Image (cartoon, rainbow, N blue to C red):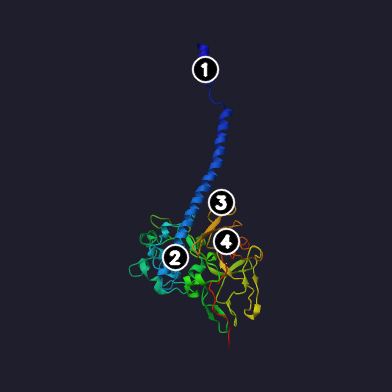
Amino acid sequence: MKRTMLKRSADRRGFTLIELLVVIAVIVILVALLVPAVQRAREAARSASCKNNLRQFGIGFYTFAEQDPQKRLCTGAYDFRRDGCVDTWGWVADLVNIGAAYPSEMICPSNPLQYSEKVNDLLGADTTDGKDGAPVSRLDTGLCNSTDGLTSLAAGTRGTFLVDRILTQGYSTNYASSWHMVRSGVRTIDDGSGNLVPTSGTKGLGGSNGPITLSVVETSPIVSSAIAMLGDAAPGDADEAVLVEDLPGLVSANARLVESFNDGPAQSSGDNIVLITTADVVLTAGGVHAWKFDILPTENTPAGVDRGNEDGTLAGDGIIWLQDTRDWFALHGAGSQPSCNILMADGSVRTFRDLNGDGYLNPGFQPATAFDAGDGYLDGTVELTKTANYGGIDIIRSSTIKGSFE
């Protein structure tokens, strides 16, 4: 009897150390295989949510345009000092005020930064602090008014008002608009010698033709599927895109903030990206159409071409002007080629890959040697081609067919 029990006990002995290690190794391998798959699935879901947000915004823009007397797709950027109070002016306000969307509840879930750097302006700027030709009346409207609104409160005491009355009521975003969407074109004046130059800084309303309209989209020589509107926002500049005070219940001071919209026309100068200024000639005397003979960069011709004084209609400046797109950022996906979701003017959402791992999407800027480390673009790799995402300046069909007669 005892022998039988001993035999059975021996038959029921536990795992050996080697067997235990084998089981642990198998579990580790399974986890190593499953965790990346789960992470990819989660990111795919976040990217899909981001794309859906952008599509809803696109529908809202066209709904707004049908109601707007000027047929604008929006009234401007999310930028208090340049465009006006964010509950009254700008694309975010437009969507909220017609009930089309609530951007504060539709942030990109892949972006760890949830608020725009323009929140700092709301916390500290006054109604007299407009930039780049902003109408003063726009700053002193809505909930920003200086009588009983946000700007009636001293800087440093606005956080609760801003949270309760503005940010949690839909008027917030972590997406960045294109320059074409909120500015559409460069406003020019005669420099006294027959040349046309920008009236003022082209990032402001005063130096632009204002927001894009249905007419521009429908008559543009650029197909609407290549005109970018809104995309994943990049982190703002480190010297200004840091929250200056707590937003009670939302986020603490010193949190990083995102950009609001792209800077517009720029050129590659040496190893830097330089924005257009009032000293730059947009159209020479006797010219017909600004930038008409610029051939934009492509993968095959990354440097682009300036055809100069072709047909005697435009004296070439030797410069390829492109859109500075560094306010967008490739947030989605892992590995060496993350991507950025961008809403186009036809309502579609396209995904553009960061091919060189710098996080940004280059329309074709080419450095003389290598871009400065602080410029964002790593090199001249073209990631936004003119047929997929137009990186040029002019999207408006010109009605001018002749130069100066006298």
Q: Mark 2 belongs to which amino acid?
A: Phe
Residue at image location 54% in from the left, 42% down from the top:
34
**Residue 238 in picture, x, y percent from top left:** 52, 61
What residue sits right under mark 2 in the picture? 61
What residue sits right under mark 3 in the picture? 334
Residue at image location 56% in from the left, 32% down from the top:
23
Q: Earlier in the sequence, mark 3 or mark 1?
A: 1
**Mark 3: which secondary structure?**
loop
**Residue 151 in picture, x, y percent from top left:** 37, 67
What residue sits right under mark 4 in the picture? 361
Q: CA distance from mark 4 to mark 2?
A: 24 Å
The reply, left or right, for residue 140 in relation to residue 294 is left
**Mark 2: which secondary structure?**
helix
Q: Earlier in the sequence, mark 4 or mark 1?
A: 1
The reply, left or right, for residue 37 in relation to residue 83 is right
What residue sits right under mark 1 in the picture? 8
Q: Mark 4 belongs to which amino acid?
A: Leu
Between tags 4 and 2, which lies in front?
Answer: 2
Q: Mark 1 belongs to which amino acid?
A: Arg
